[in-house]
Image (spheres, helix red, strand yellow):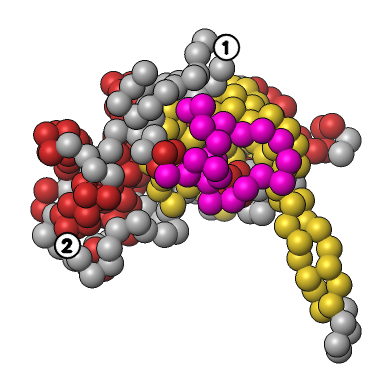
């Protein structure tokens, strides 16, 4: 028993559990001047997985794959058409009010903050809505303000915040009531490098120190690589892969790209473990397996060539999934 109610999860159960979950929408489309045809769209198609307490999992896939629909079912916004779904032992759609005390949600494209109010006032409203004890509210707010660098923003109206500032503010708001589970939908979308680094470091500390279970959906594979040991891939409503990120790269035979800027134009760079795929003047693009480390390549190039700058580009998620399909003959 906890202060949030009965928790039936245990060693044989996950904090998040899905068994054969489906979501079907009825869609009407115009087929003539006065006629409309009704058809069914299966957004989620028989998904099953478990996420144990304290795990941080990447949940990825192309646009329209079913990621957001899954999150909406996990939060109780949508009701599954079939299958069984539990979060912290609760049925999200039937026990949505109780579940709200156990979860936090951040959507990168939307905000839960009050647009015309100063950031601090939004937090005070959350304090009342979730009935957070005063001492706990102050402790959690102080911690979020410090780690997410929000002190100078507390008196600023939300509408005046930059995207990166608002995102950090949204993450803090989602954590004030100490949720067991945090759902993050594109939390670093549109953020600059510094803001991304701050958000990632905060999530890493949150997961390590408080064992908060995190389900992260993103198109940025760097988010997954730096934060998650486990990744699940969904496409066309089906779970295609569930395992380590290295295994995903192997299954999709994906490649990263090393972009090398030399002092002058030279013949294609020769380095074991990579191949040159493009040359434009002093800039060269080298492809290498995504599951391999870039460090040996960088060290060799720095020793053997007049290097000015370099960067590593992650593989595109859609490309990884497409290659997985090709490899399975789908």
Image-based side of 179 in relation to 70, left or right: left
- Is residue 321 shown to the viewer in this render? no
Q: What residue lies at 21% left-to-right and 47% top-to-bottom? A: 127
The location of residue 191, given as percent across then percent down, is 36, 53
Magenta residue check for 87: yes
Depth order, front residue of 285/325: 325
Q: What residue lies at 55% left-to-right and 44% top-to-bottom? A: 93
Q: What residue lies at 53% left-to-right and 51% top-to-bottom? A: 77
List the residue tagged with mark 2. 118
Q: Name the quadrant of the N terminus.
A: top left
- Is residue 247 shown to the viewer in this render? yes
Q: Earlier in the sequence, mark 1 or mark 2?
A: 1
Magenta residue check for 202: no
Q: Name the quadrant of the C terminus.
A: top right
**Looking at the image, residue 283 lies above or below residue 38:** above
Which segment did they paint magenta?
Answer: 74-97
């Amino acid at each position: 028993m906890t202060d949030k109610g009965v928790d039936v999860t245990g060693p044989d159960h996950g904090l998040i559990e899905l068994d054969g979950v489906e979501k079907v929408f009825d869609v009407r489309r115009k087929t003539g001047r006065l006629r409309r045809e009704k058809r069914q769209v299966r957004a989620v198609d028989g998904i099953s997985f478990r996420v144990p307490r304290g795990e941080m999992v990447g949940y990825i896939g192309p646009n329209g794959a079913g990621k957001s629909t899954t999150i909406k079912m996990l939060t109780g916004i949508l009701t599954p058409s079939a299958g069984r779904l539990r979060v912290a032992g609760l049925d999200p759609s039937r026990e949505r009010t109780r579940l709200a005390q156990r979860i936090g949600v951040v959507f990168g494209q939307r905000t839960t903050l009050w647009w015309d109010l100063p950031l601090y006032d939004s937090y005070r409203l959350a304090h009342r809505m979730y009935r957070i004890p005063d001492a706990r509210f102050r402790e959690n707010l102080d911690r979020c303000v410090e780690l997410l660098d929000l002190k100078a923003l507390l008196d600023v109206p939300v509408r005046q915040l930059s995207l990166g500032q608002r995102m950090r503010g949204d993450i803090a708001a989602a954590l004030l009531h100490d949720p067991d589970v945090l759902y993050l939908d594109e939390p670093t979308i549109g953020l600059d490098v510094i803001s991304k680094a701050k958000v990632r470091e905060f999530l890493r500390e949150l997961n390590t120190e408080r064992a908060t279970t995190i389900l992260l959906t993103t198109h940025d594979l760097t988010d997954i690589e730096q934060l998650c040991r486990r990744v699940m891939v969904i496409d066309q409503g089906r779970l295609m892969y569930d395992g380590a990120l290295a295994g995903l790269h192997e299954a999709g035979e994906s490649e990263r790209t090393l972009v090398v800027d030399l002092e002058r134009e030279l013949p294609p760079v020769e380095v074991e473990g990579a191949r040159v795929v493009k040359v434009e003047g002093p800039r060269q693009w080298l492809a290498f397996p995504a599951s391999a480390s870039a460090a040996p390549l960088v060290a060799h190039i720095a020793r053997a060539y007049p290097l000015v700058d370099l960067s590593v580009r992650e593989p595109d998620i859609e490309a990884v999934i497409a290659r997985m399909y090709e490899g399975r003959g789908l």
